[in-house]
Image: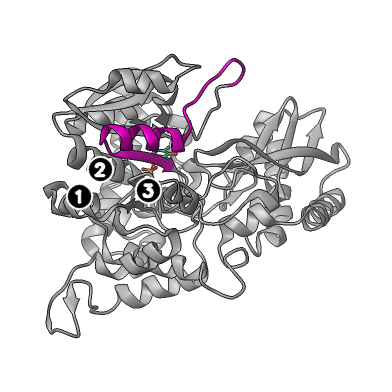
Amino acid sequence: MSESKAQSLFRKIPSVDKMLSQTSVTSLRKIYSETTVKRIVRKALESLRLGILSGEISEGDFDSVDLDKLLNTEADRLYGRKLRTLVNATGVIVHTNLGRSPLPKPVIDRITEVAMSYSNLEYDVDKGSRGDRNSHLRVLIEELTGAESALAVNNNAAAVLLALSTMAEGKEVIVSRGELIEIGGSFRIPEVMARSGAVLKEVGATNRTHPRDYIGAINQNTALILKCHTSNYRIVGFTREVELNELVEIGRTHNIPTMMDLGSGCLVDLRPHGLTDEVTVQSVIASGVDIVSFSGDKLLGGPQAGLLVGKKEYIGAMKKNPLARALRMDKMTLAGLEATLEQYTRPEGPFQSIPTLEMIARSSERLLSDAELLASSLRKSLDPNFVITIEAGSGKVGGGALPMGDLEGPRVTIRNESLSAAKLERSLRFGATPVIALVHENSVMFDCRTLLPGQLDILPGLIKKAADIATA
Ligand SMILES: *Cc1c(COP(=O)(O)O)cnc(C)c1O
């Protein structure tokens, strides 16, 4: 656009006062303070100016610019809710990008109760003096895991950092080359190790590590033997891994503590549900390892947290580490984690109340009937160009747990010769409640396993709307 044309358009930009007299401002004033409303107006005017400069708004469209709509859009863009709920139809239960474990209602209630009030967070009510925030969870974790002592921090990355810093700063930690894991792109054992001040001593080869590799690496400066759960991959084929009990034995012989970074931290046996790979925290503790670390929001099904369990002597030292203060858990998480762990003590067990476990244990009959319900509802509402089928698929536990443990289950698959799956998938994400689905070749697929209560009722409507928009 020429300079003079732009100049003449700039003159058409309404004044702040004119903007403030728009009808939408009346409703914005009910939600936002005067200062905020003025900021919205300023941003709306700025977007008009930018539109002119970029050529997006030309002479012709200027008069048709809907100022009310513009103000509402700006208000929403700037001050609308950003973190919001969505429908996870991927079948990946502990989906790291989608918030991992949804919390049970009793857990939310407890968080609300404690968060809204004063509490005995760091107060010993019996003694009438200062208390320790760690004391609240300790007994419950110790009871459930069989460990001597326990400590909870913000997440498992923090737990590993704290353990390494406490047990091995300035000293060597032996890790197998097959277990130098990376989780979610930002947690890597070698990097966390470096930050903790410990020195990584890699042993073995990627596919094979033998007991003699560990033994050969032990020297005066060795502080710890670390085993990491290869939670998001498996090394298959010609492999040799030193089992935990062998490592414990080596550690004992040479008077060196052992630690296992377990990652997912499961407290219940998942074998009856077809997942044979995941060891429980209890069994790892029973094997004699000195320290175990795991997450609160993976298979445990609770809030984001990192749990350290094991020998009193090491946990005690971790509590005294200045890093413990920086990594400590807040009162809401503490309340939520306590309420989550309590579910494991109930007569009915945790499989009904904890959504993550309920989804893992969901019966194949239930999964099929949910898929049939969704499919039949879509057959009624979508136009006949959509071909709707139910196909066998497999979900995943996800969240760096059980990489090989696929959860068999049906998937509702829709395809339309005249509409690309990518376009439909995008339209699903752009709805008021985004739906995250899977795309395979030219189909969009929905796995009902990860639907939360009530979502099966709204999903057909959301899909219909997205399909209408995508085909319009
Ligand atoms: C997930 C995972 C971590 C990181 O735990 P966060 O709770 O995400 O910080 C560390 N180690 C292993 C083995 C994991 O699976």
Q: Secondary structure at mark 3?
A: helix
Can I make out residue 64 in this image? no
Please name which of the two marks, 1 or 3, marks the residue nearer to the observer. 1
Q: Which residues are magenta?
A: 236-262
Q: Amino acid at mark 3?
A: Glu
Q: Position of residue 52 (x, y in %)?
A: 36, 29
The part of the image, by quadrant, that contains residue 35 is bottom left
Q: Position of residue 407 (x, y in %)?
A: 69, 43
| Residue picked out by circle 1 | 318
Q: Return the residue nearer the eye: 425 or 40.
A: 425
Disc 2 to disc 1: CB gap under 8 Å: yes
Please state the quadrant of the image where ligand 1 appears.
Answer: top left
Report if the beta carbon of the residue with label 2 is closer than 8 angstroms to ligand 1: no
Q: Quadrant of the C terminus?
A: top right
Residue at figure coordinates x 17%, y 28% from the top left: 171
Q: CA distance from mark 1 to mark 3?
A: 48 Å
Query: Is 254 part of what is drawn in magenta?
Result: yes
Can I make out residue 143 in this image? yes
Please indicate whether residue 157 sits to the left or right of residue 120 in the image: right
Q: Return the residue nearer the eye: 239 or 54.
A: 239
| Residue picked out by circle 2 | 163
